[in-house]
Amino acid sequence: LPAVALMDLEAALGGDLGLEAKLKFIRSALDKDEWAVRLKACEDCAAIGEPAGKMCGEAILEVCLRDFDEEVRAAANRALASFDTEIKHKLGVKLAKDGLNFTAETRKISRRNVRRCACDSVAALGPEICMPYLPDLQSSLQDSASIVRAAAAKALGVFGPLLAANEDIIRELSRMVRGDRDIITRQACSLALGQILENAGDAVVDSSDEEAEEQRSRVGSAESASATSGVDDTEELSISRAASESETGTEVQPTEGEMPEKSRKKKKKKK
């Protein structure tokens, strides 16, 4: 069935259909159960570019935030970045509301997965579109889930030297390089600091030369500190392709360390 559905999509897009008809076909393919069909639809949407934004924009954003497959989400983010500026601004508002500030937690939808994916989409859209949502992205650095904190740090790195004068963000990233419990998050913060402070010169922060030099040295030393650390509580970063092929609709659930204390006690009693 997946092969047949993919062949149907490829035949439709390669035929003599007009642009509007092709976009309708792509829009419907984004809701298919087969990951290969969704992937193909996202890739074709990115290839069409700006004209696809008006008809497929919101559906592409939904794929970015909630699709179970990492490769499909990456293709959707490429499509998102290909839309025209007006459409991207509209989708940016929805991204902040339904992604960066997503709070629901159900059996099928995980809060931390949606927020992590939202940070990835911020990185895809870039600072030109997402600068107004910088406070929401910065608050994600305090998330209880390490996959959200790491994704937020990576997204902040995309802003680069534009954040060189933002003392709060630089201070927070520096603190996390030294003290975050997750090695991947520490490395992401280190990389983000390097991208932000690169070529920043004297415009780093309003602090003494000694403090500015200390911040720069943290960037260089963080990776070696992370490599020698014996702590590695890295969370699962994506749902496996096997899970998406079975189309179980089950999101990765919080680890025991992230469960409320009462839930952990009940789990121990059952054992």
Image (tube, grey):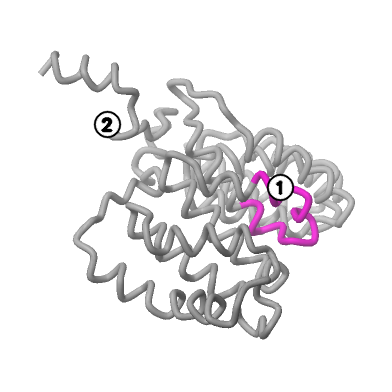
What are the residue bounds of the magenta stretch? 121-136
Q: Amino acid at mark 1?
A: Ala
Quarter of the rendering containing residue 221: bottom left
Q: Position of residue 231 (x, y in %)?
A: 23, 56
Assess disc 2: are there few (<14), some (14-19) or many (≥20) residues with their C-alpha within 10 Å of its C-alpha.
Answer: few
- The one nearer the camera, 214 or 225, is 214
Q: Position of residue 33 (x, y in %)?
A: 52, 33
Residue 154, image quadrant: bottom right
- Name the image quarter holding the C terminus: top left
Q: Which residue is mark 2?
A: 256
Indicate the secondary structure of the residue bearing disc 1: helix
Question: Magenta includes 217?
Answer: no
Q: Earlier in the sequence, mark 1 or mark 2?
A: 1
Question: Viewer-proximal residue, 90 or 203?
Answer: 203
Look at 42% across and 32% down and name the residue there. Answer: 251
Asked if 264 appears above or below 124 in the picture, the reply is above
- In the depicted view, which residue is nearer to us: 264 or 93? 264
Residue 92, labelled with which disc?
Answer: none
Left or right, 183 with respect to 166, comes to left
Task: Rate crowding at label 1 as few (under 14), some (14 to 19) or many (20 or more) other CA atoms within 10 Å.
Answer: some
Q: Which mark is residue 12?
A: 1
Q: Is residue 80 left or right of residue 64?
A: right
**Residue at the image point whose x is 81% and y is 51% from the top:** 88
Q: Position of residue 193 (x, y in %)?
A: 54, 70
x then y, percent, for residue 57: 77, 44
Prevailing secondary structure of the magenta residues: helix
Residue shown at 66% from the left, 85% from the top: 201
